[in-house]
Amino acid sequence: MATVHIGMIGCGAMGRDIARRLLQHDKRIQVAAVYDPDPRSVEQAQREFGSAPAVCSSVREMLEMPEVSWVMIASWNRYHCEQTVSAFEAGKNVFCQKPLALSIDECNAMVDAWRRSGRSFNIGLTLRYSPHYRRIKALIEEGRIGRPISLEFNETLEFNHGGYIMGDWRRLRANAGTHLLEKCCHDIDLVNWMVGARVRRVASFGGLDFFVPGNVNRMREIGRDADGRDAYTTWGGLVALNPFTSDKDIVDNQVAILEYANGVRATFHTNCNAGIPERRMVILGTEGALRADVLAGTIELRRIGFDTPMEDLSTSAMGGHGGGDDVLAAELADSMLHGMPPSVGMREGVESAVTCFAIDEALDSGSVIDADAYWDRIRSFNA
């Protein structure tokens, strides 16, 4: 198998992490070119990948390189559509970080360009690759809790993680979309997958209630960590504004109610200032219940009945992505080297994004939203 040369669009920590795992997985994969408008990210990429990758002055320059067969897009979300469409038009295969896009029109443009190109598309919905969540999906499919009826799931963030988001480029919808789309599209995708249907109706409430100037004193009250870093700032980043005084138009807490076409109902909760961080999921079925938290690495199941035992079905996977990064890199390498169809691709990216669009319209409008109107606008994926 010949060497696969990839071009990196966006050389921030997220893009470099996946590229590094790819290169460790198989020596036949090489970074041939990099592009990032921020020279600090380019310099970091050169430190990690050496001087061999060409430093491009534009996306177009990279796409014109005949040796580049795969493009990895880890740019700001606002550029995902434009860069993905351009890559397909240049005959490249694409890996794009989540979320897919910022609007229905962008989703349609990406789907259309993908279909015209005949090329491969993989998306970085990393939790789909986690052994933790794959075990949960298998337990549901095995009928261990019967037919799912309702569930609750959440993503409550450690306070420094929340502070990073509120001081980073992700704080502005124009750059990243909403907080739900940018951060929680993982969680929405997981539940779409577990339920096995499209969302039908949604309602949502939320606001920016903590990361406001009046609470900036919390940084001083909590103090500094062992390395001398102020509370809410330990994640650093290239932008790194004060999370309380920065200009922003995203929420720091949100709840949502979802009803799916197959009748399953769910609630979701996110908060960017959690004393107890969780990525928890509780699924109730006709014959039992399953409770899991990927941060703790726990999966528990109990069948309905007298004196039924609580079963510990945990995998060894735990942490923020539940071990999904290495699996993603391995599967992406198989796509690059052997043409393996992606297990998570364009359809999953579209359905996660569209579910988020509907939820956020409910948040902004204060109305219960009929999601069918969104699905009707997705030309290439109508059921």
Image (tube, rainbow, N blue to C red):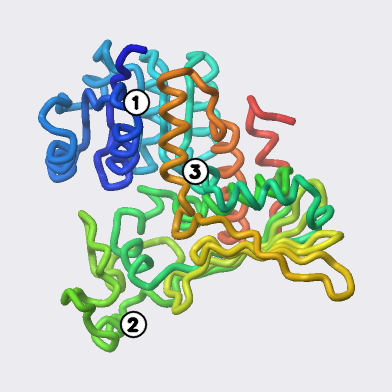
- Which residue appears farthest toward the bottom when viewing the image? 221
Give the residue number, with chain letter if any, for mark 1.
Answer: 71
Q: Tags 1 and 3 in contact by the CB under 8 Å rule? A: no
48 relative position to 154: left or right: left
Question: Which numbered disc, 3 or 2, marks the residue closer to the eye?
Answer: 3
Secondary structure, mark 3, is loop
Residue 363 location (% of width, % of height): 58, 61
Q: In this view of the protein, which residue sits in the foreground, 354 or 12?
A: 12
Secondary structure, mark 1, is strand
Look at 51% across and 66% down and name the residue there.
296
Query: Dot 2, how many residues are within 10 Å of its Cα: few (below 14), some (14-19), or many (20+)?
Result: few
Q: Is residue 113 above or below residue 255?
A: above
Along the polypeptide, which appears first: circle 1 or circle 3?
Answer: 1
Give the residue number, with chain letter if any, for mark 2.
Answer: 215
Name which quarter of the figure residue 141 lies in: top right
Q: Tags 2 and 1 in contact by the CB under 8 Å rule? A: no
Along the polypeptide, which appears first: circle 2 or circle 1?
Answer: 1
Name which quarter of the figure residue 77 lies in: top left
Residue 145 location (% of width, % of height): 79, 57
Question: Which numbered disc, 2 or 1, marks the residue closer to the eye?
Answer: 1
Q: Quadrant of the N terminus?
A: top left
Give the residue number, with chain letter if any, for mark 3.
Answer: 125
Secondary structure, mark 2, is helix
- Tell me which amino acid carries mark 3: Leu
Q: In this view of the protein, which residue sits in the foreground, 92 or 245?
A: 92
Look at 61% across and 55% down and name the residue there.
359
Q: Quadrant of the C terminus?
A: top right
As measured in the structure, the alpha-carbon distance from the residue carrying label 2 to the one carrying label 1 is: 42 Å
Residue 301 location (% of width, % of height): 72, 63
Query: Dot 1, how many residues are within 10 Å of its Cα: few (below 14), some (14-19), or many (20+)?
Result: many
